[in-house]
Amino acid sequence: MKITFNGDPITLVGPVLRVGDDAPDFLVVDNTLKNVTLKDTSGKRIFVVVPSIDTSVCDMEVRKFNEEASKLSDVTVYVVSMDLPFAQVRWCGNAGIDKVITVSDYKQKSFGKKYGTLIEEFGFLARAIFVVDENNKITYVEYCKDVINEPDYESALNAVK
């Protein structure tokens, strides 16, 4: 799989996950610095992986998923980034984001390594979407071909409906 950052090739650490794979366990932290693992999430989930919520494309993406999350009664949307939890809280507060749950992979880089989104050259995460069902099976995957591009919102959202 060829992924680029602004047209330049990058190296992703970890496996390329596919539909039907078991969702790997991970260790991230929430906005209170509490550990969160796969088993701490349940039901239908969307993991929205972004390089940094402080960039324009990530800002648009998180706002879009926050808006859509309010229409999804049985789906939890998690936004995963390397941003420090303090920055996530600040940004969400300033942006009025209240329907998605932000978690940080800064500490262990566990999510990035296990979901194949850790960019070796930069140490942050590539843009990707993973939909996981109640049985921890991956039902939708998108690794954005270029990290600076937005994902296919419609396909990701259709995968949980």
Image (cartoon, rainbow, N blue to C red):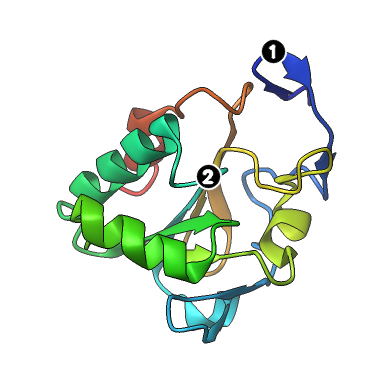
Coordinates of residue 47 in the picture (x, y in percent): 49, 55
Can you say whether 25 is above or below 63 in the image? below
Q: Which residue lies furthest to the top in this view?
A: 7
Coordinates of residue 139 in the picture (x, y in percent): 52, 48
The label number, if any, that marks residue 83 in the structure image: none
Image quarter (top left, top right, bottom left or bottom right) of the N terminus: top right
Name the residue carrying label 1.
7
The label number, if any, that marks residue 50 in the structure image: 2
Image quadrant in which you'd find residue 120? top right
Measuring 25% from the left and 65% from the top, which residue is drawn there?
74
Coordinates of residue 60 in the picture (x, y in percent): 32, 34
Whether residue 134 is visible: no
Measuring 64% from the left and 62% from the top, which residue is drawn there?
23
Whether residue 148 is visible: yes
Q: Nearer the viewer, residue 4 or 26?
A: 4
Coordinates of residue 94 in the picture (x, y in percent): 23, 55
Q: Which of marks 1 and 2 is nearer the N terminus?
A: 1
Image quadrant in which you'd find residue 128? top right
Residue 101 relative to residue 95: left or right: right
- Element at badge 1? loop
Using a 10 Å C-alpha cutoff, classify the residue at mark 2 as few (fewer than 14 neighbours), some (14 to 19) or many (20 or more): many
Measuring 22% from the left and 63% from the top, which residue is drawn there?
98
